[in-house]
């Protein structure tokens, strides 16, 4: 299919308000800058490359040339002028990652190549390019090192309040996924392919059977509708230490973004250009939008909790009245 080239598109065009709000909150943590500097000093660019590329193969014109050509197409669609190196690593989980400090590179797991179609691989590559274009890679690299090695094995963080730092980093990590799911859609320009990719990453490929995208969309709606106060608490607990949001959540978020009309406007050419972005410009609006996003969620949760408490109180009162008769 022919795709619209998004000439000079700026990452602010697709970034989720919760991503930007979570990043602002994380940067405000005491000791955050200390931790970032400690990581960069301890590992450095070469150290990170050695850590992530010890068992990976670099893609190029003669090494997986079809994947290399697909990477070229994604870069062209998103009009990104630099070409991050692409690697494949032998790993049984469908996943990929953008890694590095100064010079990001992308690593894709071999399971993605095994289980996904060419167009679904386009989704994965466009998603990772979104992280590169949004400047996420330094913080995501740190999060991955923490998950690989554990906070307790990083003695140079002894002076940092570790649990808040870890939770804040993972919260932002998950929200950055929502931004780059939008980048994946812009790079692919086929909503069903993106959602089918989510379905396969959640449950695997067909293996000779049938996958039903509409049933997966309905499952996504059911998860989001199951939103009593207690369910909200359980979801928060289940998510706190995860790297990625649940795929049903990601599917719901992406469908809401499409329904808002923003995606169609971008494809029609209405988007922020990199040439027009000034450093720091719009930060106040980003924080305001992010606060609104979180505020709406918090208000909804409090309203549910209040309603649940009121119903519990009424039920208890009725029971006591009945017992007093």
Image (cartoon, rainbow, N blue to C red):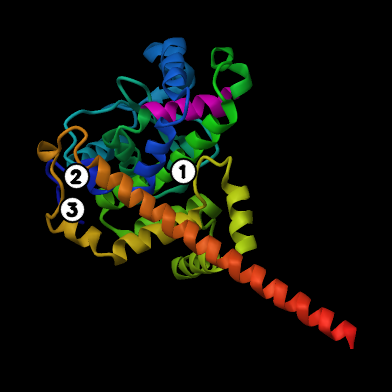
Kindly check if marks 3 and 2 are in contact, taking CB atoms under 8 A apart as contact: yes
Q: Which residue is mark 1?
A: 174
* Residue 3: assigned label: 3
Query: Which residue is at 26% across, 43% downward?
Result: 284
* Residue 62: assigned label: none
Query: Which residue is at 28% across, 27% downward?
Result: 84
Q: Which residue is mark 2?
A: 77
Q: Percent position (x, y) of residue 168?
A: 50, 36
| Earlier-in-chain disc, 3 versus 1 | 3
Residue 228 visible in the current orientation: no
| Earlier-in-chain disc, 3 versus 2 | 3
Q: Secondary structure at mark 2?
A: helix
Residue 232 sits in quarter: bottom right
Query: Which residue is at 36% across, 49% downward?
Result: 290
Q: Magenta segment: does it hold 141? A: yes
Q: Percent position (x, y) of residue 115?
A: 47, 47
Judging depth in this view, the residue of 236 and 287 nearest the camera is 287
Closer to the eye: label 3 or 1 = 1
Q: Residues within 10 Å of mark 2 (few under 14, many from 20)?
A: many
Judging depth in this view, the residue of 310 and 49 nearest the camera is 310
Q: Percent position (x, y) of residue 319?
A: 81, 80
Q: Which residues are magenta?
A: 138-150
| Earlier-in-chain disc, 2 versus 1 | 2
| Residue found at the very far bottom of the displayed protein | 325
Q: Residues within 10 Å of mark 3 (few under 14, many from 20)?
A: some
């Amino acid at each position: 299919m022919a795709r619209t080239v998004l000439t000079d598109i700026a990452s602010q065009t697709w970034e989720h308000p919760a991503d930007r709000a979570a990043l602002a909150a994380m940067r405000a943590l005491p000791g955050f800058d200390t931790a970032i500097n400690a990581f960069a000093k301890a590992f450095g660019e070469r150290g990170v490359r050695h850590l992530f590329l010890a068992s990976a193969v670099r893609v190029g014109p003669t090494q997986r040339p079809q994947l290399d050509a697909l990477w070229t197409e994604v870069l062209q669609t998103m009009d990104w002028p630099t070409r991050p190196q692409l690697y494949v690593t032998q790993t049984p989980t469908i996943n990929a990652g953008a890694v590095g400090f100064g010079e990001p590179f992308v690593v894709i797991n071999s399971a993605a190549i095994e289980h996904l179609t060419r167009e679904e691989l386009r989704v994965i590559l466009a998603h990772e390019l979104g992280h590169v274009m949004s400047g996420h890679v330094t913080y995501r690299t740190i999060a991955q090192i923490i998950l690989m090695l554990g906070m307790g094995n990083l003695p140079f963080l002894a002076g940092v309040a570790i649990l808040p730092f870890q939770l804040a980093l993972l919260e932002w990590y998950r929200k950055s996924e929502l931004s780059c799911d939008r980048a994946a859609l812009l790079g692919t320009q086929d909503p069903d392919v993106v959602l089918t990719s989510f379905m396969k990453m959640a449950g695997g490929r067909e293996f000779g059977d049938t996958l039903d995208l509409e049933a997966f969309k309905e499952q996504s709606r059911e998860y989001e509708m199951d939103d009593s106060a207690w369910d909200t608490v359980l979801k928060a607990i289940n998510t706190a230490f995860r790297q990625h949001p649940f795929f049903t959540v990601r599917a719901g978020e992406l469908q809401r973004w499409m329904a808002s009309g923003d995606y169609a406007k971008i494809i029609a050419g209405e988007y922020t250009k990199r040439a027009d972005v000034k450093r720091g410009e719009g930060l106040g609006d980003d924080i305001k939008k992010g606060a609104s996003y979180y505020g709406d969620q918090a208000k909804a949760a409090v309203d549910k909790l209040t309603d649940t408490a009121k119903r519990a109180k009424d039920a208890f009162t009725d029971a006591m009245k009945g017992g007093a008769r």
